[in-house]
Each structure stands twice: as C-alpha cells, then as structure tokens.
Image (cartoon, grey):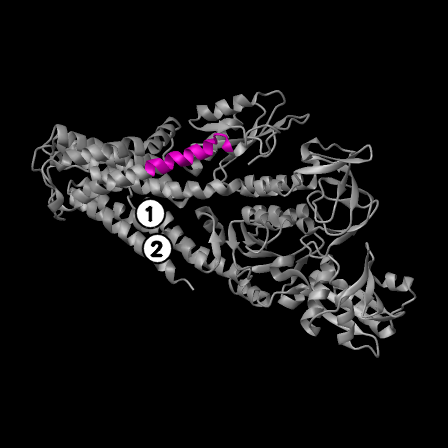
Amino acid sequence: MSTTAPVAPATGASYELDITGMTCASCANRIERKLNKLDGVEATVNYATEKAKVTAPAGLDPEVLIGTVKDAGYDATLPRPTRAQPGDADPGDADDPADRELESLRHRLIGAVVLTVPVIATAMVPAWQFTNWQWASLALAAPVVIWGAWPFHKAAAINLRHGAATMDTLISLGTLAAFGWSLYALFLGDAGEPGMRHGFEFSLQPSDGASNIYLEAAAGVTMFILAGRYFEKRSKKQAGAALRALLELGAKDVAVLRGGAEVRIPIDDLSVGDEFVVRPGEKVATDGVVVSGESALDMSMLTGESVPVEAGPGDSVVGATVNAGGRLVVRATRVGADTQLAQMARLVEDAQTGKAPVQRLADRISGVFVPIVITIAVGTLGAWLGAGFGVTAAFTAAIAVLVIACPCALGLATPTALLVGTGRGAQLGILIKGPEVLESTRQVDTVVLDKTGTVTTGTMTLVDAVAEPGVERADLLRMAGALEHASEHPIAAAVAAGARAEVGDLPAVDGFTNLEGRGVQGVVDGKAVIVGREALLADWSQALGDEVSAAKAAAEQGGKTVVAVGWDGRARGILVVADTVKPTSAQAISQFVELGLTPVLLTGDNTAVARQIADEVGVEQVHAEVLPADKVKVIAALQAEGKTVAMVGDGVNDAPALAQADLGLAMGTGTDVAIAASDITLVRGDLRSAADAIRLSRKTLRTIKSNLFWAFAYNVAAIPVAALGMLNPMLAGAAMAFSSVFVVANSLRLRTFR
C-alpha cells in the first residue's frame, strides 16, 4: 500500500490506486487495458495485491483514473496517508474499501451457510421432506442465490459487457439456471403441489422436468464458492503489511537543539540542517552526519550484520538505526521520503507491485470450460427442438446442462487443501500466507540465503581466547570478562557471556571507564585492566607478542572481530568473537540441493567472512558486501537469467529482496518487516524448515490441482447425461456430494506430511 501522497515529477505524475471488486486475474487485465487506453497513461494492475500503479501526464486529475476504473465495473481509491497529522483521527479508524469488501463477503458467507444447510438437508433426505417443504426451500434459497451470489452476478455482467467468460460467468449462469428452472417448476409445473417428493434414486432415465427443483444446487454452489472467496480475500489483505511495519521502525519524535537547549518535536517537523540529540538506546531520527560524540550504532536494519559500527564526528548515520553507545549530536541531511528507510519502503512496494499477476488455476480452466458449456447448453436446446420434442423437454435438458456444469466442489478445492496444508505447516513451524504462494514453489530452482540470522545465529559469540606465554586462559577470560561485563557494547556482552560460561562468576570492577570507539578500562582484583583495539594497548605501551599478533591477523582475515587485553603494563592476549553458523545450516543446504535448488549466499558482510561461511556450509555462489537496494538487484538479475528465485532472510534489510523474489521465506526469529514482506514464515528459525516449506507447498499445490480435476471431472462426465435428458435432481445432488467429499478427503491426506 502506498504510504505517501501522489508525487508529481516534471515529466508526469505517479499514482497508486487501491482496487476493489476484482474476482480473478482477467479483471486485473481488463482494468489495465482500460487505463492504458488513456493518452499518456502507463498502468500495471496486480491482482494479488489489488493495486494499480499508474504513471500519467502532469496535470491529469487522478479522478479521471478512478472514473476509468469505475467505468470498467470496479472501484478505485487513492490510498490513505499512513501517518496522521497531529490532531487527526487514527487512520486505522477510517473507512477502508478493502475492509468493507471483506466484511461484506463475510456477512454473505455467514448468511449463505445458515440458509443453505437446511435446503441441502431436506433435498437430499426424503424422510425430512415435509408437506410443502419445497416452498420453505425456496424461501431459504432465494436470498442466497440473489443476495449471497450478487458479486458473481455482477462480475458475470461485467464479463458479458467485455465479451469475456470466467468462472464467475459459469457460477452465475449455473445458479440462476437452477433457481430459474426451480421457479418455473414450482409456479408453472407440478413441483409446487403439496406432497411433492425428491425420490432417492440414481437411475439414468428421462424425468418430468416440470416436477424437479434444483434449489439445493443453486444455494450449495453459492455457499461453497463464497467460502473459497472469503478465505482467499482474507489472505490477500495482508499484502501491505511490510510497508506498515517499515514505517513503524522510524522514530516518532526527536530532541532538536534550539539555542543550545533541547526541544522535543514530532519527527514530521524535522528539517534538513537541524541538529538533534541521540542518547544510548534511542533511534537515530533521520539520515545525517555526526557533529559531536562517539558511539557504536546497531546497523543491522540495513546491513543485517550483528557487529555494531563505530561512529564519530563526520561519519554518516542512517535513520532508525539504534545508538548502542554514547551520546551523539547529529545534523540532519535527509528527511521524509528521501531517507534510506523511506527508500527501503519504496523498494518493497515496487517489488510487490511488480510481481506478475497471480492467476488461479480455476480461472485458467474456466477460459476453456465456460464457453464449451454454454455452447453445449445452446446446442442441446437446439437439438431437442430440432428433433421435434416439446419446449419444456428441450429447456429441461438445456437447463440440466448448466446446472450440472456448475462445479459445486470448486469452492472447496483450494481453501480446503490450503487450510489442511497450512494447518500441518503450522504444526511444523511453517506459515504459508495464501494460495498464490504455492504456484511459485513448483518452479523454484534457486534459493538465495541471507547470512546473518539465517545461515548463522545472528549474535556475537566468544569463539576463541589466545593468551600470551605465561598467562592462563582462565585468568585472561576472568579479567577481560569482568571488565566487559560493565559495558553495554554487544561485543562486550559476547565476551562477558563467554567468560562467565567458562570460568563462572566474574569479579567486580572499580573505576570503569568507556573509551568510546576504542575500548574500556577499569580495575579488577586490584589490577588496571584495558580491553579494546590494539591501538588502545599501544597507547599504554602494551604490545602483543609475535605469536598472538599472528593469531589476531589470522582471525581478522577470517572475518572475525578481535579485542586485545592487557593489565599491569603488559599485553596479556586476545579474545575472538564472531557470528557462528547454526548447527543445522549445512544439512539444510544439502536438502536444498536434493530438491534441485541451487543455493546462493547473499550478505552485506565482507567477502572474507561470507566466503568462510559459504565454505563451511557448502555453498559455492556468494554475493558479499551487498546493501538492501543491491540485494533486490541481485534477485532481479537472477530472474533476468530465467531463474525462479526463492529468498530466505530475517532482517529489515532483507524485506525488499523477500518481496522481489518469486518466493520469500522469512525466519520467524527475525523482524516483523521481513515476516510481513515474505510469503512463508519459518517459525523455528531453523533453515531446514525452508526445505520442508518448499516440499509442503509443492505437495499442497499438487493436492489443489487434483481437487480441481475432480471438481470438474464429474461435470464433464455428467454433461452428456444432462444433454440426453437423463438427469434427475438426486443424481445431480449425488454428483455434487461425491465431488465435495472427494475433495475434502484428498485434502485431509496433507495431514500426514512429514
């Protein structure tokens, strides 16, 4: 969902429209063609996200665009601003067309279920057919067919205007044919007489069409289809969650320096050139340059890397990053839509909107099936009339074709398999967002893996301690660990945790001092201890020995972070910290290869670290030192080569790439933004679950395809029976029941997935 008002560059204006009323991919194509017919307008419409991205000539009233969409039979609105101005009502309280559409669909579904169940029950169980039951069925079925199925009738009318035929066309034709013939039989035939019964027989023989009603078929089809549409619509409603999550990362207010005093103002009032204060633990309000102070900034939002970046006067900082150290004064250089955070939001937005429209399998089938059915129905009517049979008999056969052709199980085919598949996935820690996700899993041939938090743990860990000759390892850890325990720096926390795990309780520290950007010093057990950069020890004339220096160089060459330790006037050793590989990552990589996928490592970390991690887990292709915008470019480049790409990540920096990929998988242990931008969430944070997710998605898709086959199979088999005038209501009901039972039973097999 767009987060800003329309922007008007010199060459024209760009708009994003929220579209409602689309029921299939052909609707999106129709709107796109209508918009592109306007002079100077270029538009793309995404059925999955229900958005239209439009570039129009400067000065064109956006209401013209909205009017064009409405002329096509749909609704369009400019998106609401995400951030309310002071004093404004909560934008979440505004009336959202998408929410109204979903709520309307929910009400129709509830009403259809309540009214349809007794209609089907009395029609299929002769013992429950009381005197004048048929009129009670009419009273219950009429609201379902007219009000409940209204979206399908509306879509069918729009399709008719444009000379197209979709599944909505068939649903509307089938339900209206069944309902209309039932009205004829009730009012002008014999079906309305007291004591009328639907006998329990499945014989293929001509029947008196004027004595048969098909109300249960009309209402049942409507109910099942509404259920499928509701679950689909609800899943698509989450498409804009990534953008909302990104915007929530930014600071809401900021302490600006005015005349030497701090004044706290809303972030929207911050201007370029303003100087503001960032204290430890606070977010940097916007992109800027450090004026004074030194600190360590948690940049993982952008780079994904767990090692904080030291920042001092003259260094550039990025909005929404977290100050992990001392007090900073920053001069704002970019605000609002120009910040890196806003640019990341646009990257996610562009990636989502740029995906090819998702087409449901049922819609693709209907493109062929619907015209054939209509042709057969018309041909049946003509054949019976041409053979000399009466009008009633001819219409009975033609209507029977339309009734039996309407696939009652269609509404169950996708949602039932999806519900069972996603339910089993949830048990395994795999959350699949919607049916549109499944289509891409079958063709995925490349899996791109973020490093930090995905392949590795994402947290700094003490991995080694190298002591100078004559120094005990335990003493090195105890002295350094005690001093670092008093520091808030993430590297210090890793050292302290590792030392405590190895030597137990740590002694107290006196006179602790944080030398920002260089290290720490203090007194432990009466000894003056310093821990930090090698240059800090050099300032105290404490030099590392040759052996330890060589170990330090080797560790740094391998991408690890090293701190030096000294006390009592001598260097005593080094401590090595690093982000470690998850124990299951190598196994996960081998599973990807078994599935026919090519693994690729993608990270903002340096090349040496990336290569080391890749070699450890068995990945050959590596893209290192890559920022968020470039991550998207890497994904797009792979797609341009003809690859179908899955992306696995966990950080905010991964969100644009997750959205760009054909299949995005987010670690549930990561950020909300990554989860929102992804198609599948891996709750456990175990990379092996990504392979399980792909296997489960592929199996669920195969199940949906087989469900759709059986949803249509009985129709295809029974159409000749109907055309020959041999169809009776019981046979039609049995066909509906059989296909529905098969679809449900087939879907339940997904519960055995391992």
**Callout 2: few (<14), some (14-19), or many (20+) C-alpha neighbours within 10 Å?**
many
Q: Say which residue appears at 92% left-offset and 66% top-offset.
A: 541
Let me know if residue 230 is in the magenta part: no
Let me know if residue 107 is in the magenta part: yes
Could you give the CA–CA distance between mark 2 and mark 1, rounded to whole angstroms? Answer: 9 Å
Q: Say which residue appears at 56% left-offset and 68% top-offset.
A: 587
Which residue type carries mark 2? Ser
Most extreme residue toward the bottom is: 470
Can residue 58 be seen? yes
In magenta, the rendered stretch is 93-109
Q: Which circle's residue, 2 or 1, is located before the other in the chain?
A: 1
In terms of secondary structure, where does tag 2 sit? helix
Q: Are marks 2 and 1 in contact (CB under 8 Å)?
A: yes
Task: Decide which of 240, 352 is in the foreground and name it.
Answer: 240
Q: Say which residue appears at 30% left-offset and 31% top-offset.
A: 147
Q: Which residue is mark 1?
A: 412
Query: On the rendered structure, is 283 left or right of 294?
Result: left
